[in-house]
Image (cartoon, rainbow, N blue to C red):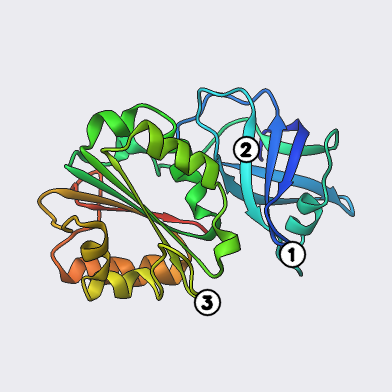
Amino acid sequence: MADWIPAKVINNRHWNSELFSLTLAANIEPFKAGQFTKLALECDGKMIQRAYSFVNPPSTNQIEIYATRVADGLLSPRLHALEAGDEVFITARANGFFTLDEVPDGDTLWLLSTGTAIGPYLSILREATAWQRFRKIVLVHAVRFAADLSYQAEINALKAAHPEQLIVQPFVSREPAPLALTGRIPQAISDGQLERHVGLPLDPKTAQLMLCGNPAMVKDTKAVLEARGFEKNLRRKPGQITVEHYW
């Protein structure tokens, strides 16, 4: 049974017609950047619940969740419609192992994401640990349209704070967009386009990669990397690929 507690909606920011971010206040237990929680609403006597990663770092008081409204979904349309002052249920205890303390040391940290899966990376990057452990960090965010590239102000603030460390590379698949690559992440790794564009090598001796997002991206990227000598990171056998199964 989930340890549900009430959370008050502070703000519901609609980035476009589908993407939204909920800011919540709730007395949750401490969590690690990269972990996830669960939100729920009661519907016809049942608790409809889904897992969402924290976007906020553990050091902040307010909780932030980044989500997509799925038109025929049971929960996300209701979350999308919430207003300040409304209430939603949240689990008091966070879960998940998609955290930096599960990632071995390296020279370069590659954070690969699609859609709302950029959320846990924003939580990680707003803590000090990543910047202390890695010389370079590459944040890759793949979306369909340029309007889906949310959190640009926060990303720009990270770039300003770490100009020599952070490289940000967006992908936009369905329209041309300034500074963005087209196509898919695994193809851009396979043909070397991503490395050429950011100016850093993908080398198993120096790189650590975190993959989060669309299952097809995660599966195909993992396969491309493994063909180049990268291995999945396991506690019993450390490697270079750390994966989060986002849905």
Q: Is residue 169 toward the left or the right of residue 17 in the image?
A: left
Q: Amino acid at mark 2?
A: Glu
Label 1 packing within 10 angstroms: few (<14), some (14-19), many (20+): few
Give the labeled residue for mark 1: 73
| Earlier sequence position, callout 1 versus callout 2 | 2
Q: Earlier in the sequence, mark 2 or mark 3?
A: 2
Q: Which mark is residue 174?
A: 3
Q: Quadrant of the C terminus?
A: bottom right
In the image, what residue type sits under mark 3? Arg
Q: Nearer the viewer, mark 1 or mark 2?
A: 2
**Picture quadrant of residue 243:** bottom left
Quadrant assignment, res 228: bottom left
Q: Residue at x 20, y 37 (%)?
A: 135
User: Residue 72's spot in the image, x, y percent?
Assistant: 76, 69
Nearer the observer, 66 or 140: 140
Q: Nearer the viewer, mark 2 or mark 3?
A: 3
Asked whether disc 2 touches disc 3, contact meaning CB atoms under 8 Å apart, the reply is no
Q: Position of residue 88 (x, y in %)?
A: 78, 39
Instruction: Give the CA distance from mark 1 to mark 3.
Output: 24 Å
Q: Looking at the image, which is closer to me, 217 or 144?
A: 144
Mark 2 lies on residue = 64
